[in-house]
Image (spheres, grey):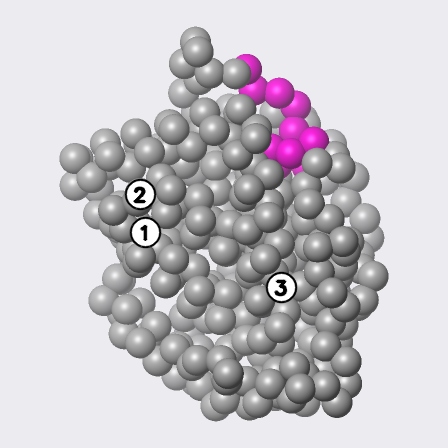
Amino acid sequence: MAREAQAGQGCLSMKTTIGLGLLLAAAAAVTGVAIAQSPAPQATAPAMRPAIQGGYLPKGAAPSSLTLLPPPPAKGSATQARDNAMAKIARALKGSPRWSQATLDADLKFPGAANTYSCAVGVDINPTATPRLYALLTRTLIDAGLATYPAKNKYMRARPFTVAGGDICTPAADAGLRKDGSYPSGHASAGWAWALILAEAAPDHQDAILARGRAFMQSRVICNVHWQSDIEAGGLVGTSVVARLHDDPVFRADLDAAKAEIAAARAAADAPTRDCKAEAAALSMEPMPAP
């Protein structure tokens, strides 16, 4: 799997490897390790097959964001006016705990990113205690993130900080983000896909998980790197990818294993290593989109 992941990285287009694509390539490499360390699937589970760029879906199987989504809002439209208003509200949170949380949410590198939803799920997510869940998150990051690129590359929408100015929460990513299309948001697609998958894996915590997913998407607006319509479109792509993933037997086997791992982690009192109280306080400052 490590060789497959490395080969998959070479398949990424130049535009895809800018910004989110760099994180996707890193996730693909980690995925190969995580799967190799995971327990072998049960005899009744399908055999692991080679994966394109570390994801579950073979090339061409993911829903096309270019077909799924309308063009981004036109200049002067009511939707763009709403985007402008929301961006202004979000920029006012710079320096606040919510800004700091948005900075944490921007980092999709593993192993840290695996614990993004740990407070909402109620257990620590790591390659040792929850290896199949860990692999599930890394692989679906690839599927959901890459699914946004047909539309991203077509429209190359300018990001809010390049249009209206203001700081971003990840200044080191400035140059790459300027060359990477804003619509739809790849972070939002992956984050909402994770929320849907985890809500299914831990249905007794579904409300907290889905609320965290919405906040994760909103973090991209607070970071001043995406418009509100970008994250909404990204969420739609993520939803479509998860629907398609349920037709994949390897994904379903990993999801079943993840449910069992979460139950075992709770029984072992494997509490999240994140500061859940601080996270909850930061997320309470959540700005709401204008109607």
Q: Does 54 lie within the magenta span?
A: yes
Quadrant of res 284? bottom left
Q: Main secondary structure of the magenta part?
A: loop
Q: Is residue 270 left or right of residue 91?
A: left
The residue singled out by tag 2 in the image is: 202
Residue 54, how many percent across, how many down? 63, 35
SS at badge 2: loop
Q: Is residue 258 left or right of residue 33?
A: left
Amino acid type, label 1: Gln
Task: State which quarter of the image contains the N terminus.
Answer: top right
**Label whose residue precedes the other's in the sequence (3 or 1):** 1
Q: Does 38 lie within the magenta span?
A: no
Residue 25, how many percent across, how many down? 66, 45
Residue 24 lies, with reference to residue 163, above or below; the image says above
Q: Which residues are magenta?
A: 47-58
Q: Are marks 1 and 2 in contact (CB under 8 Å)?
A: yes
Outermost residue to the top: 43
**Alpha carbon separation for disc pair 3 and 2:** 25 Å
**Residue at horizontal 36%, vertical 39%?**
201
**Residue at horizontal 78%, vertical 39%?**
11
